[in-house]
Image: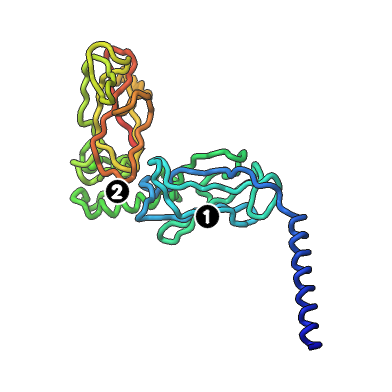
Amino acid sequence: MKVARCNVVQMAFAISYSLFTINYSLATEPPAAATPYTFLGRVMDSTHVAFDGDRTATIEVSDEQGNLLVRTATFTRADSRRNYVLAVPMATGAANGYVVQDTALEIEVTDDLGKVWSGVVVDAAAGVPGGVREVDIVLGEDADGDGIDDQLYKRLKAEWEWSEYWKAGETFDPTKDYDGDGISTINEALAGTNPYDPEDALRITAISRTGGTRSRASGADLLSTSGGSQLAATALTFDAIGGHAYTVEEATDLAAKDWKPCAFTLPGSDTPVNVLSVPFSDGPVPRTVYLLPSNASKAFFRVRAE
Ligand SMILES: [Ca+2]
Ligand SMILES: [Ca+2]
Ligand SMILES: [Ca+2]
């Protein structure tokens, strides 16, 4: 009986000790959490093809002391311009796992081959709580400083050496147009077309000018020669590739090369935009945009891919 009573006393002591511990931690609670700061954008390889479900990378954000703040390997396609979203936890004061405004950050990306890329985001820092910064991350490097990503150069050179365009004694030059489709090898690689296939190139496949205006009725797109909205009815069609973004430029004098951005609308919308972003999941598909050119009597158009 004596032994049993002794055990009860010990248990009661242990409980009150625990309660004391809880009160103590409440007294030193960290500063209040603030709305996270968000980084979002695209992680791309050196050919500017965005990573997707088949190729995932892991992105880690740490503070300057190396404390991990957030990690993501989840890629979202909710918006074709983005395949990652990172919310960096922020607080009103110093606290473990949180940063305060203007804290410098380290962002590291581990690609699907296990290679770690540091310094891929310039001036990474947490801005105001709730702020958003769009950052595209290109996993490539130009160690020899020729302006062309080294991995991309190696891949294009290797493909060239297996192609019908290789000639003994010739030095590989990515600024050359080997397949003769009018677009240089490096520009084809960046646009996502095959530099060694003349049938594969970014081309305007159709342009029609009705001379009228474009209007919408009952949800359908209509072209009319009178009435309607004031949108131009010049339709331009080109083959777009998923994961790339396209802009249209207009010039009125080819000799002067006075190229400038040309806004356009997309089917089903009257809102002018400057960029057509094609979802990753789309293959090469013809896309039509409705141009809003200047009022020049003559104009030239070109499509730029990135
Ligand atoms: Ca290089
Ligand atoms: Ca070419
Ligand atoms: Ca080609």
Q: Which residue is at a point 58% across and 39% down the rendered structure image?
A: 130
Work out whether residue 140 can be spotted.
no
Q: Give the label, 1 or 2, closer to the camera.
A: 1
In what element is the residue under mark 2?
A: loop
Q: CA distance from mark 1 to mark 2?
A: 40 Å
**Residue at image point 72% right, 53% down:** 29
Q: Does the residue at mark 1 contact the one at mark 2 (Cβ under 8 Å)?
A: no
Which image quarter is the C terminus in?
top left
Residue 158 occupies quadrant: bottom left
User: Are there few (<14), some (14-19), or many (20+) residues within 10 Å of tag 2?
Assistant: some
* The CB of the residue at mark 1 lies under 8 Å from ligand 1: no
* Residue 67 falls left or right of residue 118: right
Q: Earlier in the sequence, mark 1 or mark 2?
A: 1
Q: Nearer the viewer, residue 201 or 5?
A: 5
User: Circle 1 is placed at which residue position?
Assistant: 71
* Residue 46 left/right relative to 93: left
The crowding category of the residue bearing disc 1, from other C-alpha atoms within 10 Å (few below 14, some 14 to 19, many at least 20), is some
Along the line of sight, the residue nearer the viewer: 129 or 147: 129
Q: Which residue is mark 2?
A: 172
Picture layout, residue 40 above or below residue 226: below
Kind of residue at badge 2: Phe
Q: Total of numbered circles in the picture? A: 2
Q: Residue furthest front?
A: 1
Name the amino acid, label 1: Arg
